[in-house]
Amino acid sequence: MSIRPWVVVEAPDSRGLRRVTRGSETAGSAWSPSDLRRILRHLDFPDDVDLDDPALISWRGGDSDTWPDRPWRRRATLVVMTVGLLASMVLSAMVGWPDAAGALTFAQRMTGVLFVLTGLVQGVAAAMALDYWGRRQFRMSGAIVLLGVLIALATDSLLLFMWLEETEYTPYLLMFLPLWCWSLWALVVLVREDCWKGVPRPKRFAAGVVVTALLTGVSLAYSTMYQPTAAPMHLSLQAKFGAARADREAPFVHVPLSLHMKNTGGIPVYITNDIYTIRGRSASYYEVPGSADMLREWRETAGRGNALGDMERYAGRLKRTIISSNHVYGPGKWLEVGQEYSVERVFQIPKSAPFGTVAVNMQVSYMRKDRGKLDVDAFRNPHYTWREDEEGYYCRWERCGQQLVYSGRVRHNNNLINVTRKPRFVWATWEPGRLTNVAVSSLSRWDKKASATEVRRELDRYGAASIRAEVEASVAELLRSDGP
């Protein structure tokens, strides 16, 4: 056999991998004698070459029996690291994609895109883990794996912190809590191995990681705190009585009523409940001799449910009678910025009605559309509490009266909140002549009582509000517009 240049087998590194060189070129790396023989075959050595022949092979840092590799431990570490990075990639995509694809604001969409991009980085880090716990052919493989682990730790820590605010069970908890523990373990493993050694400029790499983390934090803070409160939310309501007209066949007067609402704020809103009620006021007119009698009249009026407590010197025995009541626009609909809605109604009163005045009261409840996405298809369909076949909504009229119940799930436009909380539902009850009621809670059934603290917190979280308007007109004026 012709004389060949020596093959040099370097000392094993921290993992037990031994680099093989011939001359100034690297021929490969070997974990075991079988790996070394495979490399030698590529260098045209025979299969039965004597590994201890000093004329052919030079051993450094040990001889042919020095193979400290622990394959099962190395492969187990590789499997756990790769599975963790892939699971973190899936979690980041699940958190970010709904916002990236369907968020209403630019900031929330960018936050979703950022989570999707971090998921892609974790996918690349999972591929690089195969190289880092393999033959390390790429100098940056360890740094990329470290970056993926740091992203996983930051994401899982954020999710865990948000979950701890209310500690509600969510299926995502079974994912991000184990991944948080895994990311701590993975970080310790990588730090012990000094995985950044292959980075050409480790300081710049570290600076890039810090800047990325800061940008992520600023983006999240902007989307979750500043942006939802920066745009004002406001509705304007208007009601107006028209000229009355007499019925040709019956002793009644038809009174037109115009109702108008407009979104004058800076964001679109969902209408969660609305009502208008027309009441006629009757009274006995006389001169009250003193203030004590006025206070007595006020007490009696307030005792009959008039929260405002009418008090007048020349009118007593005040009574308000419901003439008409209905929805204005309808729960589950929405108003874009600048959009308005008008409706014309007509109600009837007898010419001999005992009413001195008639008043219309409008109330509209709404919530910000940039904070939550309401399942309007389900919410628009009312449930009737007096129907026994309405499972989960039936309630004896002695206890609940006769109400319409509207319900639908609402998803927060920041998906970080959705994955760290129970599902939330918007509930609205409607009954003729009564003020509307709207609640947001984690209860999926109407017949259960939600905590008042939770309802207040959720109403504020989704930007729920209510507005009222009232217009009163003299019946004498309305009848005079009817003509002689």
Image (spheres, helix red, strand yellow):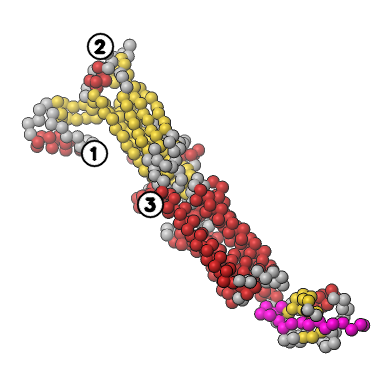
Q: CA distance from mark 3 to mark 2?
A: 57 Å
Amino acid of disc 1: Ala
Q: CA distance from mark 1 to mark 3?
A: 26 Å
Question: Nearer the observer, disc 2 or disc 1?
Answer: 2
Q: Is residue 424 above or below residue 481?
A: below
365 displayed left or right of 136: left
Which residue does the numbered mark 1 point to in the structure image? 307
Q: Inspect the magenta stretch and tell me whether residue 447 lies in it.
A: no
Sort mark 1 into few (<14), some (14-19) or many (20+) by Cα contacts within 10 Å: few
Q: Residue shown at 85%/87% (left/top)?
A: 55
Which residue does the numbered mark 2 point to in the structure image? 484
52 displayed left or right of 252: right
Sort mark 3 into few (<14), some (14-19) or many (20+) by Cα contacts within 10 Å: few
Amino acid of disc 2: Pro
Q: Is residue 330 above or below residue 197?
A: above
Q: Residue shown at 42%/44% (left/top)?
A: 368
The mark that comes first in sequence, 1 or 3, is 1
- Identify the element where label 3 is drawn: helix
Residue sitting farthest toward the right: 1
The image quadrant that residue 61 belongs to is bottom right
